[in-house]
Image (spheres, rainbow, N blue to C red):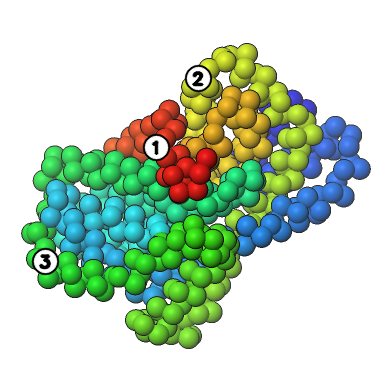
């Protein structure tokens, strides 16, 4: 089967409503049958098992659990109060708070949907109570939640590091400045939208309120310091850091703030389990699908095809970004990474693109996919909370999508934006 036929079959199954993981597995199995290579099929279980047994991937369920514990433990309200004291007086008021709070929460969960569904509920309720337009509140909540997988810790970057062998510690550091730029871009968009619509803003907070809210949020704010500091100092690996984050969140919720009760834990664990299984099942079937791509020499075909179009790394980067954004319209972010990394990994070596920089580019592109219909997971998460249609949210989203897209282009064409910090702290 040709490369086009394989991907057309995959997209057709997804458009018919088949879950992404099942669609990838079925496409691979059917391709082998059509090629008369049914003897390979006994390898399905082995390839799926091998794809999910990496020590690095253990970080995924633990970072999800840490985010769920933070959401349940009353920590999100403390973060929101501190962010409001800091930036609530800027045009856009609670819209600006929404962005800053998401940037802080990003250093704890690593998952965009956890931010949208957890902290997002706190943010949108406050904005609605203060007279903000419901569509505006929902759109900025969905957009700001995508900062989560860029600022460390990051589940997509853990997956990228697992598949490529790139240091997860370097990838985490590479996401810091791009994540901050995402926040800045969203704040600028909120500023201009709010000025145009004359949205309210808070009075400047008194110094005492900043100090009190800062003190109240101090321990949660130490979470990213604990995670990244531990990794950089060599005290623990990214996987061990995810366990430390869970223990820290559990101690805060159970003993410090006493906002988590023992009877809450089964529900938190079940939510974490279902979310983790969904991600790991996609990873498992993607491992088998990726094996098909390698057997079919599709990465080599892509390299040859793009090399014939241009020998410029910049042009190739633009083509890759277009492909990632196109895939993001139909697949969720993690699925896009799992399908395209085996193809692009050899391509970036051929064109001398830094793999750390490229990991951040792929993650940023997949974040745009979380905000674009028809398969935008953050759109669906916020839509289910607000009862707004996907169409209404999408129309409201364009200023924030534009801001994130500009950051994506900056990271793609100015490598030092993502590489300066990891090179400074961990060496080239």
Residue positioned 47% across, 42% down in the render: 423
- CB contact under 8 Å: marks 2 and 3: no
Mark 3 surroundings: few (<14), some (14-19) or many (≥20) residues within 10 A: few
Cα–Cα gap, marks 2 and 3:
50 Å
The quadrant the N terminus occupies is top right
Q: Which mark is residue 417?
A: 1
Cα–Cα gap, marks 3 and 1:
33 Å
Look at the numbered disc 2 and give the secondary structure of its residue: helix
State which mark lies toward you, 2 or 3.
3
User: Taking 394 as reference, is 328 left or right?
Assistant: right
Of mark 2 and mark 3, the one earlier in the sequence is 3
Residue 360: percent from left, percent from top = 48, 41
Write down the residue under mark 2: 315
Whether residue 315 can be seen here: yes
User: Taking 316 as reference, is 204 left or right?
Assistant: left
Mark 1 surroundings: few (<14), some (14-19) or many (≥20) residues within 10 A: some
Q: Against 363, is 67 above or below?
A: below
Write down the residue under mark 3: 207
Q: Against 300, is 75 above or below?
A: below
Q: Against 34, is 187 above or below?
A: below
Cα–Cα gap, marks 1 and 2:
19 Å
Residue 126: percent from left, percent from top = 23, 63
- CB contact under 8 Å: marks 3 and 1: no
């Amino acid at each position: 089967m040709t490369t086009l036929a394989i991907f057309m079959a995959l997209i057709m199954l997804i458009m018919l409503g088949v879950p992404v993981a099942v669609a990838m597995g079925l496409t691979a199995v059917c391709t082998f049958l059509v090629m008369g290579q049914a003897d390979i099929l006994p390898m399905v279980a082995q390839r799926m098992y091998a794809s999910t047994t990496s020590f690095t991937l253990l970080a995924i369920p633990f970072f999800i659990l840490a985010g769920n514990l933070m959401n349940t433990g009353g920590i999100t309200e403390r973060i929101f109060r501190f962010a409001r004291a800091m930036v609530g007086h800027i045009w856009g008021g609670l819209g600006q708070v929404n962005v800053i709070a998401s940037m802080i929460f990003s250093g704890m969960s690593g998952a965009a949907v956890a931010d949208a569904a957890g902290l997002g509920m706190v943010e949108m309720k406050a904005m609605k109570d203060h007279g903000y337009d419901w569509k505006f509140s929902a759109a900025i909540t969905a957009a700001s939640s995508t900062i989560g997988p860029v600022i460390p810790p990051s589940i997509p970057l853990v997956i990228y590091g697992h598949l490529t062998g790139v240091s997860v510690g370097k990838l985490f550091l590479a996401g810091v400045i791009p994540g901050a730029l995402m926040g800045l871009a969203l704040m600028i968009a909120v500023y201009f939208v709010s000025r145009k619509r004359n949205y309210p803003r808070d009075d400047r907070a008194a110094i005492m309120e900043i100090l009190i809210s800062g003190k109240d949020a101090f321990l949660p704010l130490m979470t990213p310091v604990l995670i990244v500091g531990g990794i950089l100092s060599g005290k623990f690996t990214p996987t061990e850091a995810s366990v430390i984050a869970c223990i820290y969140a559990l101690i805060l919720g159970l003993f410090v703030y006493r906002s988590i009760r023992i009877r809450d834990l089964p529900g938190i664990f079940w939510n974490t389990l279902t979310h983790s299984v969904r991600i790991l099942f996609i990873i498992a079937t993607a491992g088998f699908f990726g094996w098909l791509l390698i057997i079919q020499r599709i990465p080599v075909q892509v390299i040859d095809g793009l090399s014939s179009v241009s020998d410029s790394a910049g042009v190739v980067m633009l083509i890759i970004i277009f492909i990632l954004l196109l895939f993001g319209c139909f697949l969720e972010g993690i699925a896009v990474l799992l399908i395209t990394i085996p193809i692009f990994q050899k391509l970036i070596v051929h064109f001398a693109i830094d793999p750390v920089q490229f990991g951040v580019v792929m993650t940023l592109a997949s974040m745009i996919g979380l905000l674009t219909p028809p398969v935008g997971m953050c759109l669906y998460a916020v839509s289910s909370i607000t009862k707004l249609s996907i169409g209404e949210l999408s129309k409201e989203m364009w200023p924030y999508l534009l801001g994130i897209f500009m950051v994506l282009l900056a990271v793609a064409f100015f490598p030092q934006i993502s590489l300066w910090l990891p090179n400074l702290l961990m060496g080239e």
